[in-house]
Image (tube, rainbow, N blue to C red):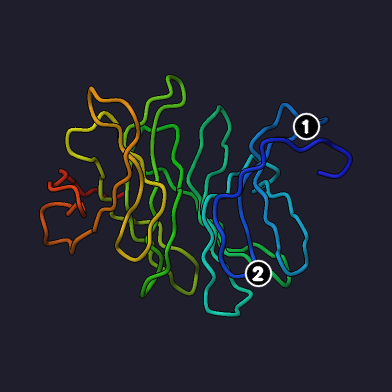
């Protein structure tokens, strides 16, 4: 970032000492927009993040693994060759500034865009929210909730996904998760304008998502990646 003009800085998530987000570089790297950043509020230092091997990376969520801990887990997406984008989850240590256990996901088979947009720590791993879609025509093929288990080797790759869709809406987004709650916005069919929602993800034996304050149930399905 040094020596160039930074534009369109967007912080997406804050926890502990860190802020994560994205920015566009209007200088010599203007043809590579959407770089991720980490801002340490204690040291007042910014770090540009493109993982792995310099690929364009987005950071949309951060979770501190214990109060006062230097261990964090982050989510977002990273560009692949031929315009593909995979969702990512990665560990980060704010003292050593070392990343570890980078794991990438394709949420739906055949989707060329997968991206995580919210993360929350739970027993045994992390709940995440994200989207999948088609980069060629800009279509979203769905919004999803999933549990990623952790183990000594890092993150599990076999994830059971729950599809999210506000009943009767033209589109639904998943913007953040906390515990088993999902929050986002939807656009009502034929009515314009975005409306917020909160959804509770039930136990797997349940047959619907309870939309708080919405007076209705959304359809859902489960699949494994």
Q: Pinpoint residue 154: horizontal percent, then vertical percent.
A: 49, 67
Q: Residue at x 64, y 39 (%)?
A: 56
Residue at 37%, 73% (x, y): give it: 124
Tell whether 40 sits left or right of 101: right
Q: Quadrant of residue 99?
A: bottom right
Nearest the viewer among 25 and 31 is 25
Which image quadrant is residue 38 in? bottom right
Residue at image coords 50%, 69%:
153
Position of 69 relative to 130 (above/below): below
* Residue position marked by numbered label 2 in the rendering: 93
Which circle's residue, 2 or 1, is located before the other in the chain?
1
Across and down, in percent, residue 66 comes to: 52, 78
Dot 1 falls on a residue whose secondary structure is loop
Q: Position of residue 123 (x, y in %)?
A: 36, 75
Q: Nearer the viewer, residue 88 or 16?
A: 16
Q: Which residue is mark 1?
A: 29
Which residue is at the far top?
137
């Amino acid at each position: 970032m040094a020596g160039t003009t930074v534009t369109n800085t967007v912080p997406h998530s804050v926890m502990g000492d860190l802020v994560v987000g994205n920015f566009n570089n209007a200088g010599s790297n203007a043809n590579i927009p959407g770089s991720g950043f980490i801002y340490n509020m204690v040291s007042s230092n910014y770090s540009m993040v493109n993982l792995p091997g310099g690929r364009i990376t987005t950071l949309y969520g951060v979770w501190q693994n214990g109060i006062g801990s230097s261990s964090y887990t982050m989510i977002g997406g990273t560009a692949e060759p031929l315009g593909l984008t995979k969702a990512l989850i990665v560990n980060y240590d704010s003292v050593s500034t070392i990343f570890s256990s980078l794991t990438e996901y394709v949420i739906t088979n055949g989707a060329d865009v997968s991206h995580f947009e919210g993360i929350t720590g739970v027993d045994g791993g992390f709940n995440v929210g994200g989207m999948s879609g088609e980069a060629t025509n800009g279509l979203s093929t769905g919004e999803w909730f999933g549990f990623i288990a952790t183990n000594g080797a890092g993150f599990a790759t076999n994830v059971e996904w729950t599809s999210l869709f506000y009943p009767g809406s033209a589109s639904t987004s998943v913007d953040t998760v906390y515990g088993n709650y999902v929050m986002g916005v939807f656009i009502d069919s034929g009515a314009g304008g975005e409306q917020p929602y909160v959804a509770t993800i039930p136990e797997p034996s349940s047959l619907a998502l309870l939309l708080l304050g919405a007076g209705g149930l959304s359809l859902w399905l489960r699949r494994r990646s």
